[in-house]
Amino acid sequence: MIKLIKIKIITAAICLCFSTNIFADQFSALGPISPDKVNVINIVDNYNKGILSKEIWNSNWQLADGKIISWQKCKYNQQSPFPKVEHPGFTSGVGRGISLSIEDDNSCDAKIGDFFIFKSTCFNNKKQIVRFICSKQNVKFLFLNGKIVYGDAAEMSEGTNEIVLVYVKKPFSKKTIPFRVINAFTGKEFGLKFKSIVPSKNKKIKIPKITDGKLKFIVKEKSNGKIKPCRLYVYNENGQPQYDYHWPSCFETFTCNGEAELNLPPGNYTFQVESGKEFMPVNGKVNIKQEKTVAKKVRLVKIADMNSEGWYAGDMHNHTIFDYTPLYIESENINIAYVPSWWINPPMGRTSKKELLDKKPLIKIDDNHFLYTRTGEDERNDCTLMFFNMPDDVEIPEATWTFPPNVYFAKKFGEISNVWVHLDHMYWWQTPQILACGELDSIEVINNNFVHGGMNRTEAWGKPRDKNKYPDPYGNAEYQQDVYFKILNCGLRIPPGAGSAAPVGGGPFGYNRVYVKVDGKLTWEKWWKNLKDGKCFITCGPLLRVTANGELPGYIFKAKKNIIIKPEIKLDSIDNITKIQIIKNGIIDKSVTYAEWLKTNDIGSVTFDESGWFLIRTLTDNPGTYRFAMTGPYYVEIGDTPKRIDKKSVEFFLNWAKEAAKRNPETEPEKKALVDKYSKETINYWNNLK
């Protein structure tokens, strides 16, 4: 089992609570935002109760049951998308603090003297949601008005409120206490102040009694009986997610090492246990009673052993932290992963500062699992790019939201030997520029618009789709695939990628992934080389392994006049498969149902009498989201014209580039001139390609 890598954790005050549903409205200033960022069910509930602002969302969402929620337009504050916490901590000398030994057995296991109990009251002029900011590693219990609080937030009643905090050990000075209470909406801090506190063995205080029950999970792999790291969804009767707060969470789920324990109020709960794409999920129901423990022993059944077949998975977009990523890797059966070392996104307070330089660039966890620490992301205005294999000595210029344009970094870093340039969506305004610069190595066809329980319908800051041609609910998914097909139709041979953007956006880590075929022993270098060669398939669900005339995806078939190519397929899925298709030059050439394929194990053949490309795609009938898998393209070269250039596809990107050129946001002459220069180069590229 992979062990967590231990590094110093900064206090939870830096966490902006992406994984805790109760603060959903903190995203109100982000402008375009998808339901995958927060717990949709809880947002709907809070919205109806009037807890959330009525003017924060600007796109329609589709829920898993097919219902549509239409949100009103928001005001996007580019400079301050999150409320600021105004004060560094509570100063001493004001108010009343109590530090006593603990009498109640429910408190914790440490010895007397290891505890600090903070008790304070505050007057609240209205009911509101509050956040508790503290060092999570040292908080044993937190009570608000006699009721235990799990996680980072609770609803504070109007009037007088009492807070009791049981704090373990002494990681603070006598002048300050690392515990704050702030308004979850505004970031304004409550005026709770404590005296300098020292332990006392002479006084006692009664801790409020904990009456909740417990739900324990022990998850094992059925084939070998070993504990299996996994991801859990636990919901109460209102559909609100529950967590074991000892483990890292991501939206509605949390990941554990195979053992978890949740403190839950009495009631009925449902749960689902998942482990990547290679194990069947396990669903169940449980009733929790007061002060009782329910133990669930779960056995996960493997439907495919991809590594034994030479297929190795990577998640090409994530924002996980170094400390937890090895656990995610093992839970989701991901072989190639990274931790971002820098992230440029000025509105979210991200800078170009490089981190993790004290870690080795490549960490080999074991023979089949690798973790890389030299990857950066440029996420601004009209585009998002990832840069893998970045050398330490490269200076990363400071950037504003709009300048320099993203293509500047694509060209600057793409010219460096071994640096891999990756585009994370298809629809960015700068997509024609990034394609034209010649440095792009992969494109994220399955990205954080594809989520576990829904589909993001928006194109965020990008070029919006034609909704008549690509209607909801799955128009965004079809639009992005179509843009990729048009890229291939322009003769650009760029392999597809996939990423989840966890835990900031999209689904949980590894939900979207790309599998690459590697012969022999897996190495970091082999995986990237074979991805470059297109020996891959991307998926947010099915496991699609294909050969065509015995060759892997990415292969170039050559013939003088014509050629007939017959694909052979191996397919496993935790979702029901509906169709298996051959996509030829962007058009569905063959389509068979899963039932038909099971009978014959045949989807037919594809014929070429001129140069082009094809790939295999399989679709599912998951009612809540768009789940599919797609191979990397095969290429066909006929006669003396090795690449097919489709003029309509070129015209599509040319018009896109012209429209983007009119969006120059710069007013300073030098900056405006540079942006115009890149736009002119892009338009010339697509004109010449015609």
Image (tube, rainbow, N blue to C red):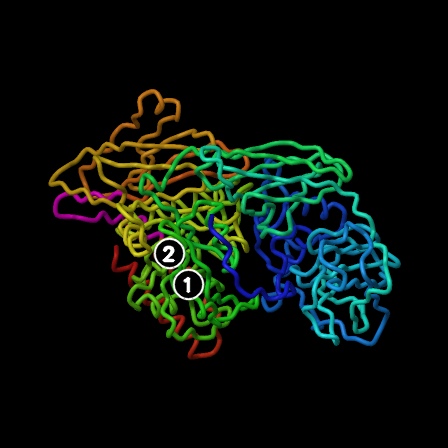
In the image, is residue 126 above or below residue 39?
A: below
| Residue tagged 2 | 655
- Residue at 39% from the left image edge and 64% from the top image edge: 361
Q: Nearer the viewer, mark 2 or mark 1?
A: 1
Q: Callout 2: 10 Å neighbours few (<14), some, many (20+)?
A: some
Front-lying residue, 440 or 547: 547
Q: Can residue 136 be found in the magenta stretch?
A: no
Q: Amino acid at mark 2?
A: Asn
Q: Are marks 2 and 1 in contact (CB under 8 Å)?
A: no
Residue lying farthest right? 159
Element at label 2: helix
Horizontal relation, residue 80 to residue 130: left or right: left
Q: Quadrant of residue 241?
A: top right
The percent coordinates of residue 454 (x first, y second) are: 55, 42
- Residue at 81% from the left image edge and 73% from the top image edge: 195
Horizontal relation, residue 511 to residue 202: left or right: left
Q: What residue span does the magenta drawing correspond to?
A: 634-652
- Residue at 39% from the left image edge and 68% from the top image edge: 409
User: Tag on residue 375?
Assistant: 1
Element at label 1: strand
Q: Can residue 637 be found in the magenta stretch?
A: yes
Q: Amino acid at mark 1?
A: Thr
Front-lying residue, 600 or 304: 304
The percent coordinates of residue 503 (x first, y second) are: 54, 54
